[in-house]
Image (cartoon, coloured by chain):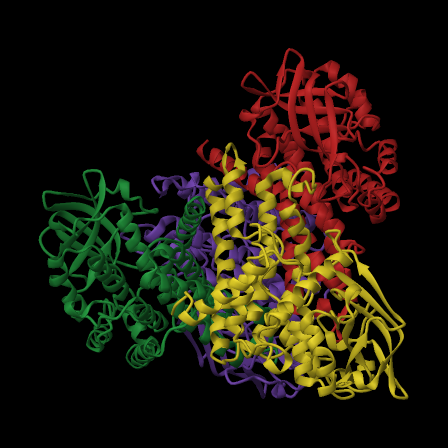
Chain colours: A yellow, B purple, C red, D green
Amino acid sequence: MDFEDTREEAEFRAECRAWLEANASERAPGSEVGMSARDNETVERAQAWQAKKADAGWACITWPREYGGRGATRIQGSIWNQEEARFETPPNLFLIGQGMLGPTLMAHGTEAQQTRYLEKMLRGEEIWCQLFSEPGAGSDLAALRTRAEQDGDAWVINGQKIWTTGAQYSRWGMIVTRTSPGAVKHKGITYFIVDMHAPGVEVRPIKQINGGSSFNEVFFSDVRVPAENMIGRVNEGWRGAITTLMNERAAIGGGGMGGGVDTLVRLAQQVPIDGRPALEDAGVRQRIARLYIRQRGVQLAGLRSLTALSRGETPGPDLSIGKLVGAPLRQEMAAFALELLGPMGAVDDDAVGDRLWQQAYLGAPGGRIAGGTDEIMRNIISERVLGLPPETRVDKHVAFEDVPTGRKS
Amino acid sequence: MDFEDTREEAEFRAECRAWLEANASERAPGSEVGMSARDNETVERAQAWQAKKADAGWACITWPREYGGRGATRIQGSIWNQEEARFETPPNLFLIGQGMLGPTLMAHGTEAQQTRYLEKMLRGEEIWCQLFSEPGAGSDLAALRTRAEQDGDAWVINGQKIWTTGAQYSRWGMIVTRTSPGAVKHKGITYFIVDMHAPGVEVRPIKQINGGSSFNEVFFSDVRVPAENMIGRVNEGWRGAITTLMNERAAIGGGGMGGGVDTLVRLAQQVPIDGRPALEDAGVRQRIARLYIRQRGVQLAGLRSLTALSRGETPGPDLSIGKLVGAPLRQEMAAFALELLGPMGAVDDDAVGDRLWQQAYLGAPGGRIAGGTDEIMRNIISERVLGLPPETRVDKHVAFEDVPTGRKS
Amino acid sequence: MNFDFDDDQKALQRAVREYLERESPLSECRRVLEGEARYSETVWRGAAEMGWLGTAIPERYGGAGLGALELALVAEEVGRALAPIPFASSIYLVSEALLQLGSEAQKERYLPQLAAGTCIGAFALQEGPGHGNGQALATVLKDGAITGDKQPVLDGDVAGLYVVACRVGDQPRLALVGAGEGVKATPVACIDGSRALARLQLSGAQAELLGDGGDAAAIEHLLDRAATLMAFEQLGGADQAFAITREYVLDRYVFGRPVGSFQAIKHRLADLFVDISLARSNSYYAAWALAGSADELPVAAAAARAAASDAFDLAASEMVHMHGGIGFTWEADAQLFYKRAKLLALTLGSPTHWRDRLTLRLARESAA
Amino acid sequence: MNFDFDDDQKALQRAVREYLERESPLSECRRVLEGEARYSETVWRGAAEMGWLGTAIPERYGGAGLGALELALVAEEVGRALAPIPFASSIYLVSEALLQLGSEAQKERYLPQLAAGTCIGAFALQEGPGHGNGQALATVLKDGAITGDKQPVLDGDVAGLYVVACRVGDQPRLALVGAGEGVKATPVACIDGSRALARLQLSGAQAELLGDGGDAAAIEHLLDRAATLMAFEQLGGADQAFAITREYVLDRYVFGRPVGSFQAIKHRLADLFVDISLARSNSYYAAWALAGSADELPVAAAAARAAASDAFDLAASEMVHMHGGIGFTWEADAQLFYKRAKLLALTLGSPTHWRDRLTLRLARESAA
């Protein structure tokens, strides 16, 4: 057991850092890498940085060499990410494509698709989005209702997707659609690549609790997709979708809004309770310790997965654990910070403070939903990891169109 | 809204107290009324006290006058209980009979049964036990397998009951049996009065975690019960059983092992943390406050039910709430007390201390199971109070003998 | 023993509820949240006209002359509706402060305006981050002039009358300050944009003591009173968040079943229902103590306020979560509860603060 | 970066596990619980013979000369088996104390006996209720004689060698005391009857300082080391309680379905599994720190110990509960875990105590 770099790892880290030092400047403490862009200028900066990395061989380093990567190990990938995070870089708008959709294309795409799309994806020339969730199909993705109907050599898509990150600046999307409503739920789904600039695609931002808009609704009205854009076969799209979701869980994690426990410790040293620093209150210390144990446990669990991955073992349940622990943890940390601030915790004003914890508190509920709700994560852990029986399913052996949907579905 | 006695209530209270003062001595602080007896002498003392109360008209005061009670209101019943608890009295061994089985006989028994049994039950001359749970039928009571088969004018019982309080000194028991295994689960059950002194009845005490034995297993081998002892009709015993269970929830509650939050406050004033009284630790104060809010909330919810009952309203969900909150609360309070004691919390020795919290900790898990598990209480609240859909039932429409039972049922 | 409100009290509550359902639907709360007003003047005016701003103000000062129990029920309805009005500030805090501590002249001058809603009161206690400590207040009253920087002050920029916690010498006191020279109230953005939050800067403003100014114990008693009423406001909010969530999980289907048929959801809703019930029992008791049993109030108010803060906070956060994706959108109403719950929990001291006081008071009783 | 034990370490762990499965089934724990012995001499002797009492004791003192990582894995297996032996006392505490602080002569004299299991060590820190404070110890060492009343002392009545926390003047020190005149160890009944608890009364008994006696910091360091190893023992217990419970809820049917098919049970087991995993990650890190990165140990040990205490406590209490009625009987094995979990959590300081230290240490690092 050793938490330090091996000699090879240290050398690789030095190599990464040397290139970064030559091409970027160090990040100011406390600032974070964004995941979305509000304007075209930011998109362009992000694309320029991605192209620069690609030219030097530092883009998608864990991708196989045949697709333009350097076939780096997971641990090397992680070292690169750690190092890059130490430098000031534009938002990473490519994660969904490079982390989830690219690997899906490698596994299920045709050679023509791989040739056409992967290099531009790697270089950041084309940004991708994932068109999965619908208003009535979130946790229960297979309940999706967006229709694709064949019309000559093309397919025509009608319906609505939601929670689509980056749709407004994406060139391409990967969309799951229903092509056979008379089949059982999981059997009538087909997976396509869709041109986000095609006629009939309309993107509308969704405003969230915290006032921001990281997500979109995307409406499809008679959008034509050529048959060559199908990923895998008709009505067999669920397999490809699962590949994407597996890669999603690997891509999520880390990051997140708000500070860490170290920031809370500093806050508790500054803010008074009854005239003394809050940290002198034993109850405050209990709460900080509980938060630390979970934060640190998740970080360490991530390192354990990495060790397993680096040996070619299947990753353990650590990714689901990280999501299940991390999302409520961020909400709890933010709530605790607001409480430490006292009535001033209610002030969410640029003119008064950095709004760090206020924005974290308002943004936190999204983290407990997006990418799999807390409940879905517990189902996954209890069923796939612990081997407990699955939920009784009433929707498994009936035609999709006969599944009960209630009033609001 | 008034938490004080009305004039009538105050007068009634004075009347209770006058009789008690003339007939018993005040209870030492901290001691509690027992609910079970270890020896015959205790049983006899308990019976003598019950007879004395009956002679003076203070036994089962909320029972209707026709059965020997005084037709007192629920609030008067509660006032009597509060007052009696202030005096030193033998353990109450009659609660199951008088609180649960008596009311069942009043509702479902024949006149002959009522005449034969109720007066002796009220006077404590005959003690009763409830024979419901079985090794494979606890939360799922209707899964019971103890058989009753007709043989001429009698029924013959074979099987095993468990968790039977007071079986060793009970004269009579009320037992639910399966009389039609080919019927669906709830439809083949018959309810009987059984003579605990009959040949073939064998009582074995169950030793619990804390070393005590408040419960028994009871084995029935060809025990003959005359047909006149049937309560209600053949295969329709589930209705009567439900009446008993409804009364169980009303009879349980209050009491319990270990001290209250006031005892914890005193402990925290005495026991040191880093050389200062534990109560000066803000974390300790947080935990005491959380416990207090729940303890007090349950007490007050009990008073709210009483108000509703006293107006003839159906009692609210407060009884289920009391059980769901109270049982884990006692476990948590005991665990917290042990922690305050520090390593000395692990000492469970008469020679060293009163073992109050140690015994409470070891006894607490039983409270979260007996009379309905935490989970059953949450089901009841979510389904019957909140109107959420019931669990999907796989055992509802098949013959009892075809219900899956797994390896260990 | 009678643990319930009487019929007149319930009729009053019904009337308030019906008024607010009609005049203060959630869209009214949203209107303020969207920045179209600092509070709902229509609802405020209506409340004044119906006479429930002055519920607990004696008739001789223009009020309805009812008691604390009636006011608690009105507070519950204000909470249920998430009414975007300065009710807590003007009524539980400033009117109550005048009633408890004000001189006869002060009562005669201000209470009728407060009951009529023509003057809004705000309570200025806090001075920046952390939890207050009366002894160390930086705001000073001397020779009729008050100077200090109070923030945040709920409803501070819509108020015309302030009760300000300050020091005279080294003693904590309460002062009355009206709008005027040396009084500057600046709006600050609030985590719950449907309520007005402000910074109040006092620079030599004209001020007088509230009555004899009170002392630390009197201020604590005032906060206990306000905490009890605030607990009812929170209880109303919790109840409503729960009711909407229950409806939603019954209507919304997932995997071919109502969301509310999943045991994980059922059990959490059961636990939430229990928490709200326990908060309700504790709050009723505190209301009874507020109405007449002063000895019981310190413990009861702390228990009620801590329990109700947690219950509303949990109800609102479960509401957002159980609404799924839609729950964290601006468009859904869940956000209104999530934000209000947090604002109310942070105002007048966090649940942690009140739990601390609760145990200290239990220990004091146990020693007595 | 390599976050795992190596193959030799895993082989050692497997050997220990196989031995304990064979020689220390739960019936052995129950035998001690039923009062037939104070500890299992067979298991103890076997452990000594296999050499793992001396896992971390250098070869020159009769040990195996392995390190802290290996010892941690042995501890995990002792915990998994609920082995009724004085392993923690004799090894994590007394042997470690000798290794860290003992003089060469003391090491040479005692370590071989401890490694061979012919002498059992016990650590006497506590003096009655509450949480210890080194400064205020009442046990005094003066002129080679020690006097004091230590309780509870785990394994105190089966030990032949004590490391005793005491004062010399007003400084906290550690002393070595052997059985002999003025040393009286009385068994006291323990909440976990499968382990020996005692009161140790010292009245002018012969004693010597352990090395130079250490100081408060040295004692704290020793407790950090023992806490890390204890965390592994708890982790083993938690794992086993979880595994048995999982089997049970799969096998036991209710309402025609396995208990483990109900979502309420599934989700709680998922949460428990997560808690155990987080405790495991924190404990592995602490073991690594114990094996060589002393700077990391204070924070890592506190986090590991608090997390592992809570995980075992919760696993054991869920085990009892999820076994239903049978779970709270004497006959069922769940009680063995419920009792052991509580004993271990209370020994060496509660999780609350360790959480407190954890934050204080984080703050110290943050200031540094």
Indicate the position of residue A224 as horizontal and vertical percent values.
Answer: 88, 79
Q: Is residue D82 left or right of residue B170?
A: left
Q: Is residue B380 left or right of residue A80?
A: right
In this view, the residue in front, A4 or D104, is A4
Residue B244 in view in this figure: yes
In this view, the residue in front, D266 or A129, is A129
Indicate the position of residue D42 as horizontal and vertical percent values.
Answer: 22, 76
In this view, the residue in front, D287 or B4, is D287
In this view, the residue in front, C178 or B12, is C178
Indicate the position of residue A230 as horizontal and vertical percent values.
Answer: 78, 84
Q: Residue at coordinates 69% horizontally, 63% vertically from top-left?
A: A48
Residue B166 in view in this figure: no
Q: Residue at coordinates 31% horizontally, 64% vertically from top-left?
A: D193
Q: Is residue A91 left or right of residue A198?
A: left
Give the tally of numbered discs. 0
Q: Quadrant of residue D89?
A: bottom left
Indicate the position of residue B357 as horizontal and vertical percent values.
Answer: 40, 53
Q: Is residue A389 above or below residue D327?
A: below
Q: Residue at coordinates 51% horizontally, 44% vertically from top-left?
A: A266
Q: Is residue D134 above or below residue B379?
A: above
Q: Quadrant of residue D113?
A: bottom left
Q: Is residue D225 above or below residue C56?
A: below
Q: Residue furthest top?
A: C143
Q: Quadrant of the N terminus of chain C?
A: top right
